Image (spheres, rainbow, N blue to C red):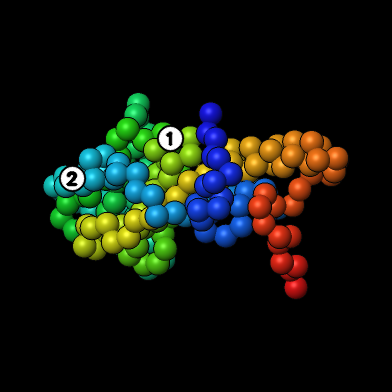
Amino acid sequence: MFVLPNKAVAEGLWPGLPPDCWPEARVVHSADDWKRLKENFKIEKIKLEKPVRFENVSPNKAYSFKTEWFRLEARISIYAEKDSLTIIKISDERGVSDVRWVNEKLLFMRIWWGRIAIEDVIFDVERDKVVYTEPAMDGYLAYQQYQAQCKGLGAHQGDRSGCKCVGKEDPPARP
């Protein structure tokens, strides 16, 4: 179970409003470092006899990739007009979602390290290099817990409608 104390809200854990103010659950990008990528993200090369083409083609129609899942490992095979195939092996993951082209040479992937721990990665297929990573967390559980907590506080204080935000003013009106 994922529980955050009210103190976490006051200390600025959330980049915007806390989960009890959200209209729905969201992914929150954070400064947390899950420290998983370095040991669980491996890049390998396989010599090619002839060019290959996978189903997910880049916008410039030159490169392509495919994703495969095995027990506790995801593999992304990338053909980038080289004499070798690039294989990204991601181990100890709980899923890799939203693998897609960002532009002609950059590949985005969202790695799930657990139920809430996420790492967004951008990989340059021409340089065979990770060029950007950002940790994030799925706020679904936090959203549910904060909503329940607010309803409980509101009922305890005689207000059956619940609260808008714990320890904050009402969120600003949307234009």
> Can you tell which quarter of the image residue 107 is in?
bottom left
Q: Quadrant of residue 89?
A: top left
Q: Which residue shows up at 81% across the image and 37% down it?
A: 155
Residue 22: in sight, yes or no? no
133 displayed left or right of 46: right
Q: Nearer the viewer, residue 120 or 160?
A: 160
- Reading the image, the residue beneath label 2 is 44
Secondary structure beneath label 2: strand
Query: Which circle's residue, 2 or 1, is located before the other in the chain?
Result: 2
Q: Which mark is residue 114?
A: 1
CA gap, disc 2 to disc 1?
24 Å
> Around disc 2, counting alpha carbons within 10 Å, would you say few (fewer than 14), some (14 to 19), or many (20 or more)?
few
Label 1 amino acid?
A: Gly
Q: Are marks 2 and 1 in contact (CB under 8 Å)?
A: no
The residue positioned 54% from the left and 46% from the top of the image is 7
Q: Which mark is residue 30?
A: none
Residue drawn at the location 23% of the way across and 53% of the way down: 51
Residue occupying image coordinates x 42% and y 63%: 102
Name above or below for residue 100 compared with residue 150. Answer: below
Mark 2 or mark 1: which is in front? 1
Q: Nearer the viewer, residue 145 or 136?
A: 145
Which of these two is toward me, 100 or 25? 25
Return the residue nearer the eye: 30 or 164.
164
Looking at the rendered structure, the kind of residue marked 2 is: Glu
**Secondary element type, mark 1:** loop
